Amino acid sequence: MGKELALKELEFLEHFLRVNRNQQPVFNSFVLRKEQLRQCNFQLWSFRTLDKFTALYQLHDVLQDTKVSDLTLYALLEKLNLLFAKGPDFEESLVMDSKLLTIALIEVLIKICRIISCDSTDSKVRHSLRKSILLSIHVQFTREYALKLWEQIEDQD
């Protein structure tokens, strides 16, 4: 189940990456204006921006090795929970480009999914950690980001 879920998430994440790089319309049919995409990306980074940036940087470092231990998987899950944290609806000043941060985040999530899809080490703890990481990515990022994009599409009409 973990490998299939990882591959499914990879498809979505790679699509979102192409959308952010202006290489593909959203869901292959809808073109968002730059401002609309900026709004979606800004919403990801409007709470605890510096903490999220630090976690993203740390995740990038952790993922330098394609072989991961159970402890590394647990650390990944912790960092993902921080990255996906939500808070009050107020705007923090964002000094970094939210589009570039979002692209970096998606690239890290893609790498995580690729590592998990190739991980053949099996134990109950490891299976649970892989599943938790993939569900976290799906529920807290993929689904939420797709909804944000869809809201922008509906606002066009």
Image: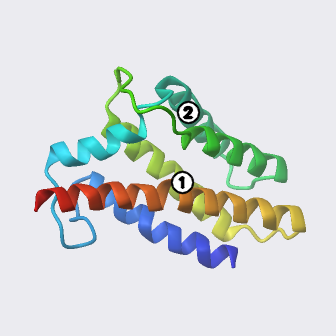
The residue indicated by pointer 1 is: 140
Which label sits on residue 57?
2
Where is residue 83 drawn, in percent x and y?
Answer: 56, 40
Q: Quadrant of the N terminus?
A: bottom right
Q: Is residue 82 above or below residue 112?
A: above
Q: Amino acid at mark 2?
A: Tyr
Residue 69 in percent (x, y) is at 81, 52
Could you say where residue 33 lies in the image, as x and y percent from the top left?
13, 51
- Position of 12 with respect to 25 (left or right) is right
Q: Quadrant of the C terminus?
A: bottom left
Q: Secondary structure at mark 2?
A: helix
Display coloring? rainbow
First-in-chain label (1 vs 2): 2
Disc number lying in front (1 or 2): 1
Q: Nearer the viewer, residue 26 or 114?
A: 26
Among the 4 quarters of the image, the one containing residue 41: top left
